Amino acid sequence: MSGDSKRITIPIGPQHPALKEPGCFTITLEGEKVVNAVVGVGYNHRGLEKACEARTYIQDLYIIERVCGICSHTHSTAFCQGVEELAGVEISPRAKFIRVIMAELERLHSHLLWLGVAAHEIGFDTLFMYSWRDRELVLDMLAMLGGNRVNYGINTLGGVRRDITPEMKQLIHKTLNAVEEQNKYYIDLALHETTLAARLSGIGKLSHEDALKYGAVGPVARASLVDDDIRVAEPYAAYDQIPVKVVTDGHCDVFGRAVVRVLEIMESIAMIRFALDNMPDGDLAVKFPRKIPAGEVFSRTEAPRGEDTHYIRSNGTDKPDRVRVRAASEANWHGMQHMLEGDYLADVPIIIAAIDPCYSCTDRAFVLKDLDRGRERVWDWQSLKRYSIDWYKERGFDASKIKLAERRI
Amino acid sequence: MRKGPGKIAGFSLKHVFKKPATISYPFGKLQLEENYRGKIEYDAESCIGCNICARDCPAGAIKVVNVGTKEEKSFQCRLDVGHCIFCAQCVDSCPKKCLRFSPHIDLAAFSRDSLKVTM
Amino acid sequence: MLTALFHIVIFPGLLFLGVYALFFAFLDRKLYARLQNRVGPPWFQPFADFCKLIGKETIIPEGADRRVFVSLPVFALAAVTAAFIYVPVWSITHPLYSFEGDLIVVLYLLTIPTLCFFLGGWYSTSLYATIGAVRALTQLFSYEVPLFMALLAPAILAGTWSIAGISAYYAAHPLYILINIPAFVVAMVACQGKLERVPFDLPEAETEIVSGTFVEYSGRLLAIFKMAIDCELVVVAALISAIFLPFYAANPCLGFLLFVVKTLIILVLLCLFRASMARVRIEQMVMFCWKILTPLAIIQIIVNLLVRGSLA
């Protein structure tokens, strides 16, 4: 306990059952009310952008796909689009449609996943189990189309790797019917269940103005009546040929975000059906050069969590000069402190979960702010290593002698 | 319009006597698609040792080596399953189609060395 | 002396209660899983969990008062077991230990575990445990009043304060059970708070405060605490079934079978409650208990007094 005698400061994380990935939320409480919240992310920096710079474009594709476990397809689509634009290659209409179908299936599974996680955060495990059960149906479809449940690997530079056969089409239609049926029930439940509504309404408020101010994206913004969707604003892949209806809601709270997500599931189902029925014939992938001409490109896609942007700079070789990924959660973190303050401690997990956060997708660089001395330091790899060795030395363990085994095959 | 709490109770009760959606893994039978990207399989007969697979592998998990002589070539594929990320780019890249994926996914092992396989 | 010891330690005391509680825990978990369309645990799972916890290292936090910290789980379990002795198991005409007013004793004994959870959390000197402890106490003040009143209302109508007496009265006048239905509902909802189950599992609330009061408990002590919670479930189910479901059989064997069936019915209802609701916030819980449950229980008491008066 620290500070004012009435106030206690409690850390949520880095290890906490409510957080699926490490992140530290330092919450100052007055009774059960949150008076101050400090959002601390950066525990999961993986150096993916640097890894991309050291590999060829075709290898990067799979690195980029692993930026996020849930919205993997949207990342690889953004990357592919960027590189295709740099190379001046136009992909076939069929490949575009397959990309859209995968993207929407991914949105389905991501939103169903979110529904389950949110239900779990508020102790409603039955809804959690059911929504994840139905998510399995979608995952099976994705596994059938791409060959894996999460990192589908269906995108390749210049098109897609696998086709959708008529049998698959039938199966997808069948699954969609089942998911739609279930989702109608969830919509009914989310809108009308008393305990659910009592827990979700009025918390994590983010007004329309604040959503614009903090630059919120995706369902968080759309639940604050911000009509923002890359699929409409800047149609990519085949979204210009498919009717997209943007779902918005005026609740401006966690309840609104839940409503937006369950309604978006219905929209996605309609879009997949349309895309399946109107899929043109054509090649899957076109021939793609290994070396990409110099240039830079900015590519945007709509991930299930919001706008996902990739910046790629090429220098004429087969490796990119710079890759910058901004995952959707990165934009949504900014409003988090505002959303948390004034609510109860019991609501902290669900408010955090309501933006559908991705921690490791977001972590990019180490900027440690020394609050006592009021200065910032950017740590590079060497100084971090030195710091960790010193830290352990102080505690009686000398790590400097340890040599890591060379990686060999 | 708000309905009372416990709305899901009827829905749940209906499922009590239905077949559960989960299985007691590893005892139950797991259903995998035929084209699931599991462990890579290798056909040494048609391999020409071009190592394009190794060049395109994002994880540096695969390598084809010539264990025979320069005249009598005999290839071996060394795969580190621990490093493999199962993207199957090597399968796509292989000009002779001597690599393919299998739906074999139970690959857990007690040591890292046992994950390094030679095919 | 020897029979008393037998009753306390073996049947219907500690051993029987423990085994029955583990069986109950299994049924609760299995049914919960089936309600969620899952396979659920095998029958020995609660027993395996218990054994595993017993075998684990017990860590006592540095800042905690060692003696209090260690004795609290034992206290909780002892109180629950003591309460069970007074609940009729196989016969309501020849109860083991029964006296006028044992209902009050049982209710008070059942409050001790909650107080132990509070003290356990408080003495753990951990932030999460402290918040859990405060929540446990806040919750205690909310559900205890409606729960007590809901259980006392049938007693008022029956004109006796002994559990066996109440059972016998309603067994003789089965139609009067219908008058107590609102009290039954109140008791069922309020005992979710006592048992710290969803929607009132705020002191534990895993996703909010890790596991609240029990966050610093480990190994054997945690096993005893968990056992106390499982036993409490049995005792509360037995108590509610004795008061609100007073069907009985003269034959002790049949009576025991009926006891099992009755408690299972209560368990199924409790499990259904747990499966179909989200956890509420502490202020919502207090509001709900004081604004809805308590007035309902008061009305029940008034109705029962009136019925009693008109009967006399």
Image: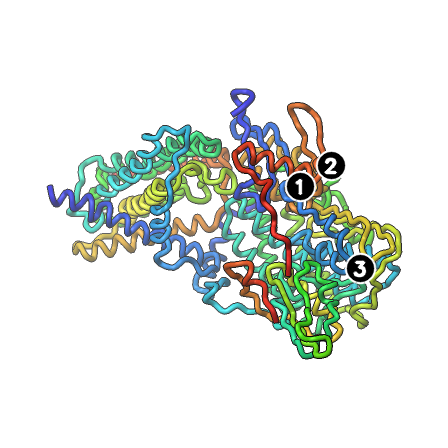
**Disc 3 residue type (three-letter):** Ala
Is B73 placed above or below C164 here? below
Q: Callout 1 environment at 10 Å: few (<14), some (14 to 19), or many (20+)? A: many
Task: Tell me whether the residue at label 3 lies in contact with that at label 2, contact meaning CB atoms closer than 8 angstroms.
Answer: no
Disc 3/disc 2 C-alpha distance (Å): 28 Å
The quadrant the C terminus of chain A occupies is: bottom right
Task: Please give the chain letter of the residue carrying mark 1.
Answer: A
Disc 1 from disc 2: Cα separation: 17 Å
Mark 1 vs mark 2: same chain?
Answer: yes
Q: Which residue is mark 1?
A: A251
For disc 3, the chain is: A
Colour setting: rainbow
Tell me the tag on residue A214. 2
Q: Is residue C234 left or right of residue A15?
A: left
Residue in the foreground of this view, choosing between A175 and B33: B33
SS class, disc 1: loop
Task: Locate residue A333, reporting x and y percent.
Answer: 68, 39
Report the residue at 71% width, 31% height from top: A377
Q: Residue at x 62, y 34 (%)?
A: A340
- Is A182 on the left-hand or right-hand side of C306? right
Mark 3 vs 1, N-terminal side: 3
x and y percent of residue C132 in the render?
A: 45, 34
Label 3 to label 1: alpha-carbon separation: 31 Å
Q: Contact, CB < 8 Å: mark 3 with mark 1?
A: no
**Tag of residue C173:** none
At label 1, the amino acid type is His
Query: Residue at label 3?
Result: A237
Residue that appears at 41% across and 30% down: C62
Give whichever of discs 3 and 2 has the lower sequence position.
2
Disc 1 versus disc 2: nearer the observer: 2
**Label 2: how many residues lie within 10 Å, few (<14), some (14-19) or many (20+)?**
some
